[in-house]
Structure formats: structure tokens, C-alpha cells
Amino acid sequence: MLEIFKSLPAGGSIFNIIAILTGSTAGLFIGKLIPEKMQGTIFNCLGLFTLYIGINMSLNTKHSIAVLLSLIIGAVTGEILGIENKLNTLGDKLKSKLKTSNARFTQGFVSATLLFCVGSMAIIGAIEDGLRHNPEILMTKGIMDGIASIMFAGSMGIGVVFSVFPLFIYQGGITLFSSMLENVITPDMYANISGLGGLMIMGIGLNFMKITSLKLGDMLPGLVYVIFFTILFS
């Protein structure tokens, strides 16, 4: 199977998408069999596990100040650009066109998009796939995302399925243009991107459990700023 996806452009991202589609489709059917109260319990467990993943990722940080500045300036930039609002608007438009009554469509779309896109595995895996035609990291991530999407779709519905579109643009884009990043991304940059991504994923977990209502989409520009600040503090 590995050889098949090695031979495809952005093969790792293609596998990732297939895994999410399979998992989320299964989750839609499983979700109908799970009582509403139990769905709430699963939702909280998913939030706790997401928080755990984020904590593990954030521990990889090499320059804490660089990550902090990137998080703050990135969030301000995202708020000015209205990234979170645009993601929500996109989700609402899809919901309207599909005429779905699922109140969690937008939340599922946005939350799944952030969880599947943000993180060191997405970035490093996409670069590895592009530079060395090695999709193993993204295939491993795909298996993880597929399992997570079962629970996501069961809790939040069909919005999770549509997260594959921004995922493919994001990961596939990095893969196709990774040769341009070859002399830019250093081990410290990887570590700080992972650390910042971990903080964002922690935010997803907290939002799931309704402890906070962070606008995580607005924080995404921080993943660009962290490269600059890593260079500055190295």
C-alpha cells in the first residue's frame, strides 16, 4: 500500500482524506445509535483527549517567547482578517446548501479542520512527502485522524466530512511547494511550530468541554510568525 501512495502526487494527503472520509462516514451511522446523553459524555472525553494531545505537542517548544509572541500577534492578525468568522461563514454556507438541520455542522467543520490541519505531523509529513516522496508520516496521521473522525462525526455530524477540502488544500499545498521550504525550515522551527500547534489544539479541547470559547481560527497566522521569531531568537 505504501508504494501505491508513494507514486501519487501528495499521496500522503490522499490517504489522509480517504481515512477521514471512511471514519466520518462510519461515525454518522454510529452516532445515530448513541443516546444524546452518551454523546455528551463522548464529546467531553474527546475534548480531554484533544487536550492531552495538545499538551504533548506543546512540550516540544524550543523558544517559549517566540511561541508566545507568535500566538499573540497571530491572533491579532487573524482577528483583523476575520479568519474565524470566514471559516464560520463557509461552514454556514455549506450547511445552507445541504439544508441540514444539524446545529453542530459549523462547529464540526471548523473544529475538525483545525484539528486535522494544525500540528507538526501535518506540516512535517507534508514536507517529507514533497521532498522525499515518503508519505509514511501522513499515512500514520491519517489512521489517527480516521479514528478521531468517527467520534467527531458521531458527536457533530456531517460537517466533519467537509473538513477534507481545506485539509487537502493545506497539506497538498505544503507538499507541492515544499521544495521552496527546504532551506528555510530548521529543527528549531519544527519544534516551535509543534509547540504553537499544541497550544491551539489544547484550545480545541477546552472549547469542546465548553470551558472556553476561543477563536482558534484567528490564531492560525501564528504558524507563519513563529518561523520569523524562531530565526530572531536563535
Image: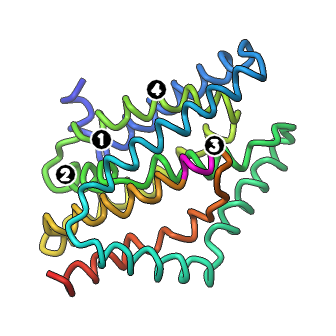
Query: Callout 1: helix, strand or loop?
Result: helix
User: On screen, 183 above or below 90?
Assistant: below
Name the residue beneath numbered marker 4.
147
Name the residue beneath numbered marker 2.
128
Residue in front for this viewpoint, 54 or 220: 54
Name the residue beneath numbered marker 3.
209
Amino acid type shown at disc 1: Leu
Q: Main secondary structure of the magenta part?
A: helix
Question: Quick check: marks 4 and 2 in contact, CB under 8 Å?
Answer: no
Asked which quadrant contains residue 100, the reply is top right
Asked which quadrant contains residue 7, the reply is top left
Percent x, y of residue 207: 62, 51
Residue in front for this viewpoint, 117 or 15: 117
Magenta segment range? 204-208
Whether residue 206 appears in magenta in the rendering, the answer is yes
Name the residue beneath numbered marker 1.
138
Amino acid type shown at disc 2: Glu
